[in-house]
Image: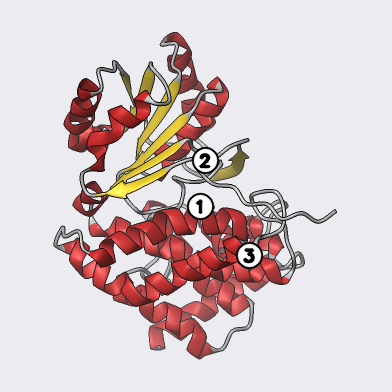
Amino acid sequence: MQKRVFISPKKYIQGAGVISQLGEEVGKIGTTPLVLSDSVVWGITGDAVEESFKAADISYTFEEFSGEASNTEIDRLTGVGKDKNTDVIIGLGGGKTIDTAKAVADALDVPVVIAPTTASTDAPTSALSVIYSDEGVFESYKFYNKNPDLVLVDSKVVVGAPVLFLASGMGDAMATLVEARASQKRNSNTMAGGKATLAAQAIAEKAEEILFEQGPAAYKAAKQGLVTPQVEAVIEANTLLSGLGFENGGLAAAHAVHNGFTALEGEVHNLTHGQKVAYGILTQLVLEGYPDTEILRYAHFFQAIELPTTLKELHLEDASYEDLLKIGELATAEGETARNMDSDLTPEQVADAILAVNELTKNG
């Protein structure tokens, strides 16, 4: 039996200053919240969060996140939640904090509130986490029975972060339609557990439209710390449209190539999720046989917002072919999303496509 499935968070709030409503919104969900955040994010947002909970007359517990979305850290924070009789988890920060918060909430069987402080990934709205080893190597996806109960995005906080994060979010979000289109060509199942809906397709198309039309202007405004209509549109595209689009539309090779990059040591490991996904998009387009003009349309967009399009910009200019094969092996492993696009894809094909992108973009 074929079935179409669409899933989403219960509530999404976005706007400049909405972090002041966090306590009030959390109070509708639970009474003993546990806030997870790293020290840098807490230094930036802690006072506003404290004020919001004080205004709502709610006590909370803060626990510092170590920085890696690993099973070790998930188990540690689950123990803290049990000790504190937590009835709602709040993930405040970037993608790995968010993914960890979802995993802890699932382990405790309590609601989860996501308050991203960047628009750098589409993790906030989804019912899954990307799990890494303690050393930061991709291990697996962890799936949950439901999406977050609330996603709250303060646009002013987002533009206060380094502009690289907004650009990285655009790199991640640009994969939404590219991967959904490839996945749907093979009628593959989506992360939601069924076939893609028309709604998912429309959302993915809208995400790409917003990025191409408003992305460069939003990038320039965000560099100056400005919240403009273009910035708000891109934050929504990066977070809500991309989140709903990837989960309900389907993933393919772009994210698999990103996961493949985690097989290598060195500077590539320090690049953001979206920086690596951007190169993964170009690699997928080569693998699908798109003409150079179409591949360069995406590459020129990435160049306009300073995302990597060459091996040198990935710090892989000295990588051997054997190194690229390691990327290909991880990208084509059993259970990887590249199989949604082509179940016969080989590590050699991925390595060759990575090299082909480099040749095209360094001269394009």
Amino acid type, residue under disc 3 in the picture: Leu
Picture layout, residue 322 above or below residue 270? below
Instruction: Determine the residue positioned at 45% across, 84% down.
Output: 296
Residue annotated with mark 3: 198
User: In this orientation, which residue lies closer to the viewer: 189 or 343?
Assistant: 189
Q: Are marks 2 and 1 in contact (CB under 8 Å)?
A: yes
Picture layout, residue 144 above or below residue 157? above
Give x and y (percent) for residue 43: 19, 33
Instruction: Determine the residue positioned at 54% across, 80% down.
Output: 356
Amino acid type, residue under disc 2 in the picture: Tyr
Residue annotated with mark 2: 132
Residue annotated with mark 1: 262
Instruction: Determine the residue positioned at 63% across, 83% down.
Output: 289
**For marks 2 and 3 on the same chain, the one whose residue lies earlier in the sequence:** 2
Q: Quadrant of residue 285?
A: bottom right
On the picture, is 313 further left or further right than 224?
right
**For marks 3 and 1 on the same chain, the one whose residue lies earlier in the sequence:** 3
User: In this orientation, which residue lies closer to the viewer: 230 or 324?
Assistant: 230
Picture layout, residue 193 above or below residue 69? below
Q: Residue furthest right?
A: 1
On the picture, is 197 further left or further right than 238?
right
Q: Residues within 10 Å of mark 1 (few under 14, many from 20)?
A: many
